[in-house]
Amino acid sequence: MAVVRRRSSLPQAPSYTIEQVEAISRDHDEPDWLRERRLEAWAQYQALPMPYMEEEWRRTDYRHIRWDEADRLINANGVDARSVPVKNLEPLTGAEQGGLLVFVDGKVVSHELADQLARQGVIFTDLRTAVREREDLVKAHFMTRAVTPADGKFAALHAALWDYGVFVHVPRNTAAELPLHVVCYNTAAGAGLGHVLVVLDENAQATMQVEYASQDRARQSAYIGATELIVGAAGNLRYVSLQDWNRETFEFSHQRGVVGRDAQLDWVNGVMGSRLTKAFIEVDTVGAGANARVSGFFFADRGQFFDLDTQQNHNAPLTNTDLLFKGAARDNARTLWQGMIKSLPKMQQIDGYQVCRNLMLSDEARMDSIPGLEIEADDVACSHAATFGTLEEEPIYYLMSRGITRPQAQLMIIEGFFDELLQRIPFERVRQRLMDEIEAKIIA
């Protein structure tokens, strides 16, 4: 018998219009091809229902978002870099970095690029500037090879209404040795639609970190974002993403890395903030010999809900993917990790590994992990696992017997749990900052 659902039980949609899409394109004097792509994406958005009971969404309830607050496009008025906490602006290593790009409420408030990288032909700029000055590169890669509007309702909405972003291009045979640093910070409530597009040509190398954070606000906000990491043949990209939105922000994001022949992608993804995060995190190995390592850490408390959906797609033979996620939850928080390793037919001699390790710090917290395999080849080495644990009394008692207080003993054990993953972050200063944030969640 069919089940009739009350209209109020279904998720509501944001109140955007095609006139807003056209206005964004017109106000920024965008080229015809970009305007047409926006309108095509809007048509796809309109044709799709709000996600609700599909497999990847049926455990995620976001009906409590107040779109009348959260979908208001943020207008940056009088903001500058002084609004951003000092800790977010510090150089990642030592006193020097290859580039710093700071957005406040979607507006560029600081942009630096080291002469060394500029002489090498490295492009590190905001996406609107790149559309004007390197239209050929942006047109070829923007939402064509990694994230596309067809990926879902929120991906299509992002493609239609994105309002700011980052563009990085490292030319062939170029090693950008100094790290690139991006900060996206919001002071106002409302919606942000940020985009990250990184393109490494053949035999190029780069290290990059992007941080997302916002001031505390009583009104709800939304971040509808996309990240595209495209690594050409024999390229090597180390990429770190850290998210610490305020507790009234709802994130819906699509993130995908595309890794070419004999290329390397080392991707670290950290989630600490937001009220709800629904993130699709995918890697596609598209050339023989491609290798991708994806590391994720998350820590939820006080009613937060993190839904992290990962996928490792082996689209070429002789490829390797290695995924390790570690997370903790306390109070009445909830986390969900859904993982999948996929291979196309005849993609032989692939090695795919995925594991999610969970640490439950209260009886009220809930953590779910759902690993999966879809393998259409017979010469493979693919495995998956999920583990759950709690703080055991024996090691806590041992530390307390050495004069350490109980809260400090608990913190030491939790830090030890996360240490393996934090060590994958290539910046000591950032690792220490994250340890401080973990401590704040435990001591709070």
Image (cartoon, rainbow, N blue to C red):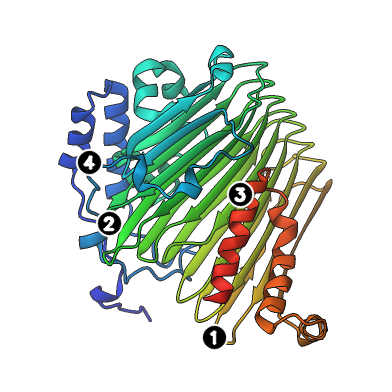
Query: Is disc 4 placed on a helix, strand or loop?
Result: loop
Residue type at mark 2 is Ala
Q: Nearer the viewer, residue 102 or 352?
A: 102
Q: Residues within 10 Å of mark 3 (few under 14, many from 20)?
A: many
Residue linked to disc 3: 430
Extreme residue in the left direction: 19
* Residue 194: percent from left, percent from top: 38, 42
Tag 3, which secondary structure?
A: helix
371 or 31, which is in the foreground? 31
User: Can residue 335 be spotted in the picture?
Assistant: no
Q: Is residue 174 above or below residue 7?
A: above
In the image, residue 89 lies at what x, y percent?
A: 48, 42
Left or right of 249 in this view: 385: right
The residue at 55%/69% (across/down) is 440
Looking at numbered disc 3 in the image, what kind of residue is underneath it? Answer: Val
**Mark earlier in primary sequence (4, 2):** 4
Disc 1 residue type? Glu
Q: Residues within 10 Å of mark 1 (few under 14, many from 20)?
A: few
Res. 189 mark:
2
* Nearest-to-viewer mark from 4 and 1: 4
Which of pointers 2 and 3 lies earlier in the amino acid sequence? Answer: 2
Three-letter code, disc 4: Gly
Labels 4 & 1 near each other (Cβ < 8 A):
no
Residue identified by numbered label 4: 78
Quadrant of the rendered image containing residue 258: top right
Residue that appears at 73% across and 73% down: 413
Q: Nearer the viewer, mark 4 or mark 2?
A: 4
Q: Which residue is mark 1?
A: 364
Q: CA distance from mark 2 to mark 3?
A: 26 Å
